[in-house]
Amino acid sequence: MPPADTRSVKPRTTARCQFQSFNEQSDPSQVAPRIAALRQAMAGHDLAGFVIPRSDQHQGEYVPACDERLAWATGFTGSAGSAVVLVDNAALVVDGRYTLQSSAQTDTTIITPVQMADQSQEAWIEANLPSGGVLGFDPWVHTPDQVRKLETAAARAGGTLKAISPNPVDAIWSDRPAPPSAPVVSYANQLAGETTSAKIDRVREALAKAKCGALVVSDPHNMCWLLNVRGGDVPHTPLALCYGIIKTSGPVKLFIDPAKLSPAVIDDMIGACQPFAPAEFVLALAELGKAGLTVRLDASSAASAIRDAVEAAGGKADVGADPIALMKAAKNATELAGSRAAHRRDGAAVTRFLSWFAREAPNGDLTEIDAAIELERFRRETNALKEISFGSIAGAGPNAALPHYRVTTASNRLIEPGIFLIDSGGQYEDGTTDITRTLAVSHVTPDMRRHYTLVLKGHVAISRAVFPKGTSGAQIDALARVALWEAGLDFDHGTGHGVGAYLSVHEGPQRIAKTGHTPLEVGMILSNEPGYYREGHYGIRIENLIVVEPRTIEGAEREMFGFETVTLCPYERALIDVGLLNQSERDWIDAYHARVLAELGPLVGPAERSWLEPACAAL
Amino acid sequence: MPPADTRSVKPRTTARCQFQSFNEQSDPSQVAPRIAALRQAMAGHDLAGFVIPRSDQHQGEYVPACDERLAWATGFTGSAGSAVVLVDNAALVVDGRYTLQSSAQTDTTIITPVQMADQSQEAWIEANLPSGGVLGFDPWVHTPDQVRKLETAAARAGGTLKAISPNPVDAIWSDRPAPPSAPVVSYANQLAGETTSAKIDRVREALAKAKCGALVVSDPHNMCWLLNVRGGDVPHTPLALCYGIIKTSGPVKLFIDPAKLSPAVIDDMIGACQPFAPAEFVLALAELGKAGLTVRLDASSAASAIRDAVEAAGGKADVGADPIALMKAAKNATELAGSRAAHRRDGAAVTRFLSWFAREAPNGDLTEIDAAIELERFRRETNALKEISFGSIAGAGPNAALPHYRVTTASNRLIEPGIFLIDSGGQYEDGTTDITRTLAVSHVTPDMRRHYTLVLKGHVAISRAVFPKGTSGAQIDALARVALWEAGLDFDHGTGHGVGAYLSVHEGPQRIAKTGHTPLEVGMILSNEPGYYREGHYGIRIENLIVVEPRTIEGAEREMFGFETVTLCPYERALIDVGLLNQSERDWIDAYHARVLAELGPLVGPAERSWLEPACAAL
């Protein structure tokens, strides 16, 4: 959705993206009848209210269409938010990114958009749930921690909280899409680098150490990693939606729609893993409980219904970290080799795009959507692109100042002289990429160059960082900010997120942010993306992916780590104010550019190489 | 206690410290009869075990003699640790600092010293408490959080936990010292800068915001700050041990030994505060409970007995942060003016010491104790010294490599050529100081100079840091380490702790450390003390106190903060390798030295000024 000052324009091209749509379809007129039907269903349960989070039963970033209950009920299609529907009023609670979009997409005569910073979901419940009222929730789409917060809020209002399952929305959702059933494919050992049985052994060691008799895997990314399979159930991530149960011995139980499994895939799994229909999952949880086991549940993805099922049957739910998350985060040598190959391929595609952009942008008729479509085309021309790893962020002028901006037909801007920011990535079978470049279009101001250079200094500081084993991302996050801080500037997002190996482009638990307390381990892939956003004017972000690697330092007394940069693509020299760089920063950038030219030069055409060579010359 | 390789020597001087003893008195032969008596007392309560932490009922850093139960029962006099006494065995759990000291001070045939890193107190209980056994604890010397951990440990062993009050140790401690009753003195408004009633108003605002009907103040530092009084019940801190209760109206209740209060002090308090005998505290807690109030308790200092008393009477205990802690942490203009004056005075005393040391140390006959005694003498000669703010850390050679080293007659080393580290501070009525200088004695090696300079670079990085409002100490801690990290080195303590205003030299919640998540606020005083420790050889630490101050930066878009350095004293130029400093570091050091000379020059004698002038010359 556009900020108020944006004039949307038509794209120049009539081509389309294969993996991304720029339409934010929403029909606010549907909100009234749907909320009315929900209220009728609520009455049948004697409910004073019902909570509809955006989450699905895996707390996933991408939600399949059949689980887009929030969008169905409220019209709001953003990636985060929740609705609380009471008998006489209703709220749609969203964060700052979605202020305008929530108001535009929902029917505000029925549902009041609420800014999370002004009032949290819990505060709204506390203020609005009638005393004595029962607030319903679907225990499959909230974690125990989320339920606890709802419970406190309901109690503060003098009401109570009640689990309602199945979800009453599903009963009134007449044209609800079927659950996705994309085929599961094997992820070959020459890509995964570790057999499923070796991975299962490691998980069992971790379970024994934690004194747990079983692990319920509620995050499907973790199951895909464990079983060396991938799927296609949600956009932008090769994910097979499923659950798993791992006990101290016997085959891993996989709960998945059997339609997704080919005989070949089932064959690959034999021995390590036994598939079951999803309907058998709850029975299997009860069995764990009956056996009196301590069952590890993942605090960030396991639904409270899972905990309830284990405990109701007599088991002990140990809500903590799924040990797979940390194993999956530290990539092995094979995965890293794959990531490097993917980044060379992706870097060549982005370089071709930059060369095209340098030629076309000065004409003045390109729009944000044109750039996004063209970049996807260059990636598809690698003949290896499986998907883009997220909807491109292509921002011109003030749109670039919105860190999470997604271009739509309604917000599409002409790319005018100044700064253009493009943040995008690809899913290749050997790796997931994520890169941001901020580009100069014709004339740029001294302020733009100064701000770009301050961001670049932070980006280089992270790239060059060395730190002892045990250091967390929280400890080094400030290195990306010092240059900006010295100028009285900052940016309001973390410096980096974890990235998967042909899995999610947003992967935990590793991150470089003040909340990133997981120690960085060798093999972890992270983004390095400081930024600067001048509201209403322009935005800057520079992003490479980096890998934690061991470092040998003469005379070192500690085990030291540093980062290998795997993203290959030149920075925007028209935006670099060389006078603001110190010698070690210049040396690092020159060495990086030399490497970019050496690795990508042979992968692009002669015209593109003619563009790349000066782009990679020493500063 | 000495590390194994230390040869202790006699001090050169026969002078004594007024505020510090170098004897670690302990008589291991007392352990057997005392533990036997305790086991008899345990039998009377049907206990299988009893826990003796080092803590008193305020969880204070300094414990009055009457509460040194751990030292009485085990002989161990360290500042942290705990004993678990079972019927057939017993453990003394200490951290790495106290490995040698615990073994030397206790009777190891009766009590097994356990290293916390090898086995926590809880793990030892889990492994050793007999199944079905009842583990006793004194609910006045454990916080609710500590009790929860003991409870889990006892349950894992198949046993249970039981509160025993009064403490069975007290019943068998025949020659137990009387509680301290140093006179309480008023802390004048021209030092405190804010009246008690204004402070109380602020606390009440915070209570209203937190929806609490009352606050129990269990940390006596907070009561002393609130009531603008000081005392003398523990070493090194002008603390009056007491409790307080603040309700939404009416005078603050102060629970304190009436012998400590002079008529003049009582007069000063009238209106704002009403004193009660300590015995009335529990009754007052029950009254809060009976009134059905939500009572805020301080998670870090309130005993579980306080929570129990409130809850047993029907109140709701809200265990969280005492809002006074944050108010006390951000010093007002008057307190900061006092701190600056104290630091000029203290800086002059330390400068006189340094000039003396530069003359005497090369003779080769000085010992660590001589240096500590002489430094205290220079401080006393200010005629303003009330106390030293902690026992001096005076370390020569390998002793300096122990960050928490305290010199004793048994560990006292000759100060030989190389590095000497001295970390010390004073308590003046207008402020508390804490300074570390690492000094060159005759010949120093290139490695020593390189390591000193790397530590100094980190120290200067913190001194020069600017950061937006909202930044925590955890976020900037790494700035003190980057130079060391680049050389493969690090130090295993935080970079800085909070410091009180004529109160504790260790004050929370502000700190510069990876666990310091409190946002830094204007007026907070912190230490800036990175270090480097080469085990068995030498140690380096450089410490100044710094104050968070607002910063004006041209073009700034954020509210920015930085640090004012209040400690005044030259660095050791014989240890600075100027070639390792960049220009901004040199500029900062030169400007600091110029300021030191300008401010301290007039406060020292001619001979000392002759030493100070070259010490403060530009590098």
Image (cartoon, coloured by chain):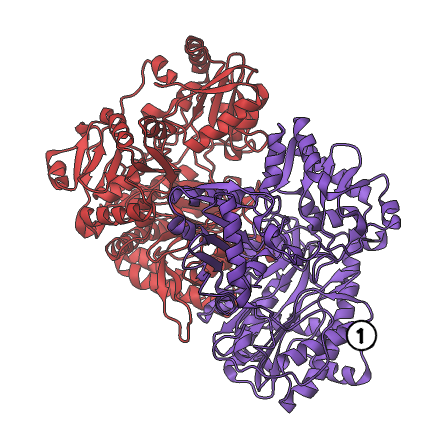
Chain colours: A red, B purple
Q: How many marks?
A: 1
User: Which chain is mark 1 on?
Assistant: B
Residue wearing tag 1: B381
Percent position (x, y) of residue B462?
Answer: 60, 63
Percent position (x, y) of residue A64?
Answer: 32, 28
| Mark 1 nearby-residue class (10 Å; few <14, some 14–19, many ≥20) | few
Q: Nearer the viewer, residue A567 or A315?
A: A315
Residue B608 sits above or below residue A444 on the image: below
Q: Nearer the viewer, residue B54 or B534?
A: B54
Q: Is residue B484 left or right of residue A196?
A: right
Percent position (x, y) of residue B361?
Answer: 65, 86
Quadrant of residue A569 in the image?
bottom left
Q: Is residue A141 left or right of residue A335?
A: right
Q: Is residue A9 left or right of residue A274?
A: right
Q: Is residue A79 visible?
A: no
State the quadrant of the C terminus of chain A. bottom left
Q: Give amino acid for label 1.
A: Glu
Query: For the residue labelled by badge 1, is the local secondary structure a helix, a strand or a loop?
Result: loop
Q: Is residue A124 visible?
A: yes
Quadrant of residue B275 in the image?
top right
- Residue at coordinates 63% horizontally, 72% vertically from top-left? B23
Percent position (x, y) of residue B147?
Answer: 52, 43
